[in-house]
Image (cartoon, grey):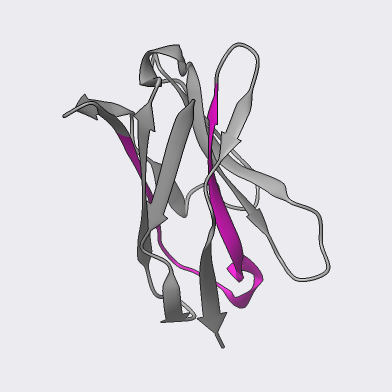
Amino acid sequence: QVQLVESGGGLVQAGGSLRLSCAASGSISSIYRMGWYRQAPGKQREVVATVTSGGSTNYADSVKGRFTLSAISRANAKNTMYLQMNSMSPEDTAVYYCAADTLFLRYWGQGTPVTVSS
């Protein structure tokens, strides 16, 4: 089992920045990839960015050049990663979910809401 705890969401003005954090605990040795997904009201959940345990990152086209995902750091029996979001726009408003992939399962965090005002 893997437990995920997110933090850092909130309200920001257009053009501003936020940093989201995700801490994974439990069977973290089984995690090969972590990522952030988001779901806006009335829309399907979509991938924002992912990072593998080897450090390879991928970004959605809509966030390239604005969002930066850190490598997965391991300390104190936790895997932690950060999503730095810059130059934010109202289109970034959504609930952001952290996810961790193991060989057989994807685990989800509870989600943290992000609202960008115009």
Find the residue positioned furthest to the left: 76
Which residue is drawn at the image coordinates 40% and 48% (left, top)? Answer: 5
Which residue is drawn at the image coordinates 41% and 53% (left, top)? Answer: 6
Position above or below: 34 against 83: above
The quarter of the picture where residue 18 lies is bottom left
Locate residue 56 relative to residue 103 in the image: left or right. Answer: left
The quarter of the picture where residue 101 lies is top right
The magenta stretch spans residue 96: yes
The percent position of residue 9, horizontal first and vertical second, equals: 43, 67
Locate residue 104 relative to residue 114 in the image: left or right. Answer: right
Is any part of residue 84 visible from this angle?
no
Is any part of residue 37 visible from this angle?
yes
The percent position of residue 81, horizontal first and vertical second, equals: 34, 39
Locate residue 70 relative to residue 110 in the image: left or right. Answer: left
Count how many numbered circles sit on residues in the image. 0
Say which of 29 and 9 sits in front.
Answer: 29
Main secondary structure type of the part rendered in magenta? strand
Which residue is drawn at the image coordinates 41% and 62% (left, top)? Answer: 86
Which residue is drawn at the image coordinates 47% and 55% (left, top)? Answer: 66
The percent position of residue 8, horizontal first and vertical second, equals: 36, 63
Q: Magenta span covers which residues?
A: 80-101
The percent position of residue 82, horizontal first and vertical second, equals: 34, 45
Find the residue positioned furthest to the bottom: 118
Position above or below: 10 against 97: below
Locate residue 83 relative to residue 112 in the image: left or right. Answer: left
The quarter of the picture where residue 77 lies is top left
Q: Quadrant of the C terminus?
A: bottom right
Say which of 20 and 77 sits in front.
Answer: 77
Say which of 12 and 33 sits in front.
Answer: 33
The magenta stretch spans residue 105: no
